[in-house]
């Protein structure tokens, strides 16, 4: 910006102040340099300037600084498409001049220049148009003043347009571009007099980013022109892409005047990349050079996404590398009569313009300058040449897109002049128009031409409308532009983009090609960004235990409700299975079978004892306590059934209290029997009357007393903090253990400790009585039974604490059954065996030890 300002001031000093200070008459104008002749020219009452990129290079010159530099001169091949743009300006002016409604009685002229896509030439053209000198027919060194240019249409490129606009802006001189799309040109503080009929890249970049996101591409490459057009356009795209969550593997820049080594490096980056989609924000000339380089060593198939500069350029269709390319282009249009205007060129008319002469001679490979040939060796044109017989971008009017932008720009300037110099269809061509008047009036322009609206917003931009263009192979094998959708920025947000037909991709199918750094993470996983890589490169990490993700590419997993657990895929929370020892599982059936079998055994033994109640062995073993013990053992076996099945409030209270009371009753009976044995032998000693203190009544009272203590403990337990059903979700994460919570652990362990004390006391007494003389000493069997009982319940404690889930209940049932079976087998099995199988031993003499006994 500062450089351009200094340049402007310097030139003003040289052209305005220096002659006066040096003694030169300021009225006399002397040309200090070589003027640039226009390529196309027509005089008129008001002149419209034009600047187009008809060539892409300036002729190189070695600067020696010892002689005057040569005049700037374009080089390279001609872009006939740009020539068509220039002639669109001619055509529009001819239409306006022949119109009776627009500028009647006034003739518009034009001066059209070739800027060579270079900033130096663009600046030189800008100053010539601003000065308004007659540089065409004046062959002297004077610079006679001609009609000033009312406005300028151009330039085609953003960088030359920026340079020209900085100069025009200093003088309030209006510039309307047909092809400069850089979003930076919308800044009215820097470019106050710049207008354009083509939308800003701000809209195109946002539209491209939305399209890429819509198609599911998150891993792309990017290449751009190293110019204002490419750099600003790509910057806008990358910003929009970042907001859409799109990652860019690489972003390379190239300009056609840079060394070939830079071009080869950019091409190699594209060949080596893993991204299958590449967004190209390049000028048409840069894109052509890049594709030529890539064609020498074609990369894997790529899906090209193009900017409007090249994606609708017919000259690009020869590159099969871009088959299936998609991009936003300016809307296709129809300009009536334009094709005939382009083709109706006579050799005489062509010779008047150096640009048309070059075009004619390159198209037909003949020379118009000499009938017998020219110094270049080309044969003379014989007059039979006809533009209708050739096909090139100049003659192709099937894709009038940018040409219509020139057409609309010309009419916008004409309408502006009309609003200033005409009133009631009367126009005054002698009115002196100031450039600022045209700039101000351009902001208010609003008309429709050939059904195409023309207007400018506060930034000098039109409403952004695009066509989504797809390169599709036709039936004859050729490639053509096919409109597959539209984009209209005037529509509500979210409705700007519409697709009208299927897109054919680079593989010839309608299936959208994939281009991702990492495949999508399925439900049940979350994304974890790979260290040092873009966010689109990630690993899919399975959700942790208890967490799920139910959407693709989830950034995180969320925990299930405590009563739920993920399924195998970890994409859904399912109710946790509730586990308890049920009646229909094998373990429950087995334990229930043993419980019922044990109770039946106890009842069977009671029946045997009852039927043989008068036998000596039954009488000798305190039949009343024996029956009570068998009854309590039956209850012990049956109480284990309360531990099976779904825990309820009542079953939880019943199982522990029933277990505690029945076992105390059982141990009390065993203790009573042990005391009876001890007392019985004590009573045989001379002078002993101990049995009268431990008769049947005392035995019953002792059993009742011991049992009432346990009943009291259970009542206190149930009153203060009773057991209750509880969903245990701490032991297992993936399932719920439905168990009976103890309520009060003190109450539970008090019950067990009391049972243990009675059992230990019984064991000690039975152990002391084991040596008493008797052929059938019951104390021995009680000792064995108590030994088994204590061993079972001692091992029960660690097993109970360490067993998980329903196995805790199974351990408790097993301890009940094992201790019950131990008691019934050790105490009653030998007696039943004698009663049933050895009746001869069921005699008082045998029991008293007066008959030798057989080994049992």
Image (cartoon, rainbow, N blue to C red):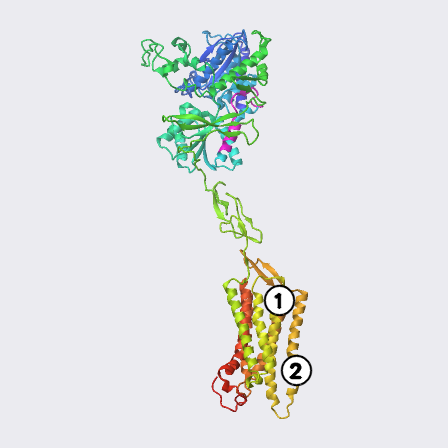
State whether residue 198 appears in this view.
Answer: yes
Quadrant in the picture for residue 720 = bottom right
Q: Which mark is residue 178?
A: none
* Residue 529 located within the stretch drawn in magenta: no
Q: Secondary structure at mark 2?
A: helix
Which stretch is magenta? 188-211
Sequence-wise first label, 2 or 1: 1
Residue 84 versus residue 654: which sits nearer the camera?
654
Quarter occupied by residue 733: bottom right
Residue 550 relative to residue 395: left or right = right
Q: Considering only vertical position in the picture, is 63 above or below 782?
A: above
Reading the image, the residue beneath label 1 is: 654
Q: Identify the residue under disc 2.
A: 698
- 194 drawn magenta: yes
User: Residue 388 at x, y = what percent?
Assistant: 38, 15
Residue 25 place in picture, x, y as percent: 54, 7
Dot 1 falls on a residue whose secondary structure is helix
- The Cα atoms of the two marked residues, 2 and 1, are separated by 30 Å
């Amino acid at each position: 910006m500062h450089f351009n300002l200094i340049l402007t001031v310097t030139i003003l000093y040289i052209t305005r102040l220096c002659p006066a200070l040096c003694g030169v008459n300021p009225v006399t104008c002397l040309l200090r340099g070589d003027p640039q002749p226009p390529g196309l020219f027509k005089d008129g009452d008001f002149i419209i300037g034009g600047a187009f990129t008809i060539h892409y290079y300036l002729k190189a010159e070695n600067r020696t600084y010892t002689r005057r530099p040569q005049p700037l001169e374009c080089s390279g091949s001609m872009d006939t498409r740009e020539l068509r743009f220039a002639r669109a300006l001619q055509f529009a002016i001819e239409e306006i001049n022949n119109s009776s409604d627009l500028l009647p009685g006034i003739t518009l002229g034009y001066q059209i220049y070739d800027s060579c896509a270079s900033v130096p030439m663009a600046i030189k053209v800008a100053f010539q148009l601003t000065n308004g000198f007659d540089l065409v027919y004046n062959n002297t060194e004077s610079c006679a003043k001609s009609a000033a240019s009312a406005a300028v249409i151009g330039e085609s490129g953003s960088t030359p347009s920026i340079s020209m606009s900085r100069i025009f802006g200093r003088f309030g001189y209006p510039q309307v571009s047909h092809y400069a799309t850089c979003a930076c040109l919308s800044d009215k503080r820097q470019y106050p007099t710049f207008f354009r009929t083509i939308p800003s890249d701000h809209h195109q970049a946002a539209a491209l980013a939305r399209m890429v996101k819509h198609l599911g591409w998150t891993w792309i490459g990017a290449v751009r022109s190293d110019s204002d057009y490419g750099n600003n356009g790509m910057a806008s795209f990358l910003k929009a892409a970042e907001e859409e969550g799109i990652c860019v593997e690489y972003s390379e820049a190239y300009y056609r005047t840079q060394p070939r080594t830079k071009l080869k490096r950019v091409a190699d980056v594209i060949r080596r990349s893993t991204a299958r989609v590449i967004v190209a924000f390049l000028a048409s000339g840069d894109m052509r050079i890049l594709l030529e380089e890539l064609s020498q060593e074609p990369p894997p198939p790529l899906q090209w996404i193009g900017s409007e500069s090249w994606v609708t350029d017919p000259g690009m269709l020869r590159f099969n590398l871009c088959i299936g390319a998609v991009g936003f282009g300016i809307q296709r249009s129809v300009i009536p009569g334009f094709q005939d205007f382009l083709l109706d060129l006579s050799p005489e008319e062509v010779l008047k313009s150096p640009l048309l002469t070059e075009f004619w001679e390159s198209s037909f490979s003949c020379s118009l300058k000499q009938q017998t040939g020219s110094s270049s060796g080309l044969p003379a044109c014989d007059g039979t040449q006809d533009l209708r017989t050739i096909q090139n971008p100049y003659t192709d009017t099937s894709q009038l897109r940018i040409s219509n932008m020139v057409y609309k720009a010309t009419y916008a300037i004409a309408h502006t002049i009309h609003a200033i110099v005409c009133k009631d269809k009367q126009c005054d061509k002698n009115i002196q128009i100031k450039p600022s008047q045209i700039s101000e009036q351009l902001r208010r322009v609003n008309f429709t031409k050939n059904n195409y609206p023309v207007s400018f917003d506060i930034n000098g931009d039109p409403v952004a409308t695009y066509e989504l263009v797809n390169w599709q192979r036709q039936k004859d094998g050729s490639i053509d532009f096919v409109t597959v959708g539209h984009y209209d920025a005037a529509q509500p947000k979210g409705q700007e983009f519409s697709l009208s037909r299927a897109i054919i991709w680079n593989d010839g199918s309608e299936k959208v090609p994939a281009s991702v750094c990492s495949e999508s993470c399925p439900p049940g996983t979350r994304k974890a960004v790979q260290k040092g890589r873009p966010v689109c490169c990630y690993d899919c990490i399975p959700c942790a235990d208890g967490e799920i993700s139910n959407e693709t590419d989830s950034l995180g997993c969320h925990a299930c409700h405590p009563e739920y657990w993920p399924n195998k895929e970890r994409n859904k929370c399912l109710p946790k299975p509730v586990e308890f020892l049920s009646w229909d599982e094998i373990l429950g059936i087995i334990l229930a079978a043993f419980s019922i079998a044990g109770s039946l055994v106890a009842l069977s033994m009671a029946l045997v004892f009852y039927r043989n109640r008068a036998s000596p062995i039954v009488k000798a073993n305190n039949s009343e306590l024996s029956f009570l013990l068998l009854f309590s053992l039956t209850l012990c076996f049956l109480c284990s059934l309360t531990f099976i099945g779904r825990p309820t409030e009542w079953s939880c209270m019943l199982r522990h209290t029933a277990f505690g009371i029945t076992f105390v009753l059982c141990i009390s009976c065993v203790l009573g029997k042990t005391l009876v044995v001890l007392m019985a032998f004590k009573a045989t000693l001379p002078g002993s009357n101990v049995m009268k203190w431990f008769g049947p009544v005392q035995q019953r009272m002792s059993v009742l007393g011991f049992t009432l203590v346990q009943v009291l403990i259970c009542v206190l337990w149930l009153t203060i903090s009773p057991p209750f059903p509880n969903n245990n979700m701490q032991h297992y994460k993936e399932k719920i253990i439905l168990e009976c919570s103890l309520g009060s652990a003190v109450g539970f362990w008090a019950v067990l400790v009391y049972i243990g004390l009675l059992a230990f006391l019984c064991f000690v007494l039975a152990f002391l009585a084991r040596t008493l003389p008797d052929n059938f000493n019951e104390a021995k069997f009680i000792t064995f039974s108590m030994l088994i009982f204590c061993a079972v319940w001692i091992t029960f404690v660690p097993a109970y604490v360490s067993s998980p889930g329903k196995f805790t209940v199974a351990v408790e049932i097993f301890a009940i059954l094992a201790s019950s079976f131990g008691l019934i087998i050790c105490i009653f099995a030998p007696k039943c065996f004698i009663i049933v199988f050895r009746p001869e031993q069921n005699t008082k003499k045998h029991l008293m030890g007066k008959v030798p006994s057989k080994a049992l």
